[in-house]
Each structure stands twice: as C-alpha cells, then as structure tokens.
Amino acid sequence: MEFEKELKEIVERYVDVVKKQSKAKNIDEFIKDESTIYHLNRIYDTKSLLTDLSGSFGEETELDTRIKQYGLGTVFAVVNSVKNYYVENYNSGEDEWLNYIVTDLNHDFPIEYAK
C-alpha cells in the first residue's frame, strides 16, 4: 500500500478512537474537551511529521527503510505516543529539531542492514 493512503487510514482509525473516547455529547462540549483536542492535534502533527520525514527529509531519516522493517502502524504509534518527544521536537522551532528526531528514530527503530 502506498505511504499516503496507509497513513490516511491510520490517522482515521486514531481519530475514530479519540472521538469514541470523548465524553462530549455535542459539538460545543467536544471543542471544550481539552484532552480530546490535545490528542487530535497530536495525531495530525504526527501525520505532518511523518509526511515531512518521508518526503523532504527522507534521505537523512531513512524513514522509508524503517517503515519497511517495522511497519507504518508501529512507527506511527511510537511517534504519536505521549511517552516520546517526536511531535514536541518537530513543533519546537529549534534549529536542531531534525537531529533530535533522527537520534530518537535510531534509538526506537534501528536499521538492520542485510549482511
């Protein structure tokens, strides 16, 4: 499956889970639910990050190789997790954000080359 299509399906599944977990009964309650909004923002930030890493920064991050080894679903789950700082580094505006992300990718998804 192509990257964009698979990523869209993963995002839709994550959004559906967040919407189902929300206790909001109507749209007014939904937009005031800070936890829900936080998780939705994180999902879409993760999507943007992975899209950028696969496109503009593909050579530096070797994201496509990592996705082949670990699967896009697994990579998305780890990058989206609140236990990691991928999204925060991406949104930080710091000059070194990409270096931080590459370091984390190397830790979480080491690339195993065939011998």
Image (tube, rainbow, N blue to C red):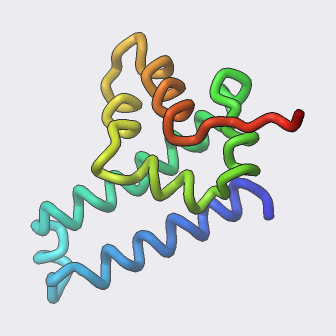
Which residue is nearer to you in this view: 3 or 101? 101
State left or right for residue 28 relative to residue 6.
left
Residue 98 screen position, x and y as percent: 49, 21
In terms of image quadrants, where is residue 35?
A: bottom left
Task: Name the image quarter holding the N terminus.
Answer: bottom right
Horizontal side of 87 relative to 77 (left or right) equals left
Residue 112 in the image: x percent, y percent?
74, 38
User: Which residue is the extreme one toward the front?
Assistant: 115
Q: Is residue 82 above or below residue 95?
A: below
Rendered residue at 53%/34% (across/down): 105
Indicate the quadrant where residue 61 lies.
Answer: top right
Question: Which residue extends farthest bottom?
Answer: 25
Which residue is at a point 29% across and 51% down the rendered structure image?
82
Residue at image position (58%, 41%) is 109
Closest to the observer: 104 or 53?
Answer: 104
Quarter of the figure with residue 113: top right
Residue 114 position in % (x across, y down): 86, 37
Q: How many marks?
A: 0
Left or right position of 25 against 113: left
Q: Position of residue 17 (x, y in %)?
A: 37, 78
Vertical placement of 18 versus 5: above or below? below
Compared with residue 10, is residue 108 higher up or lower down, i.e. above or below? above
**Residue 91 in the image: above or below residue 13:** above
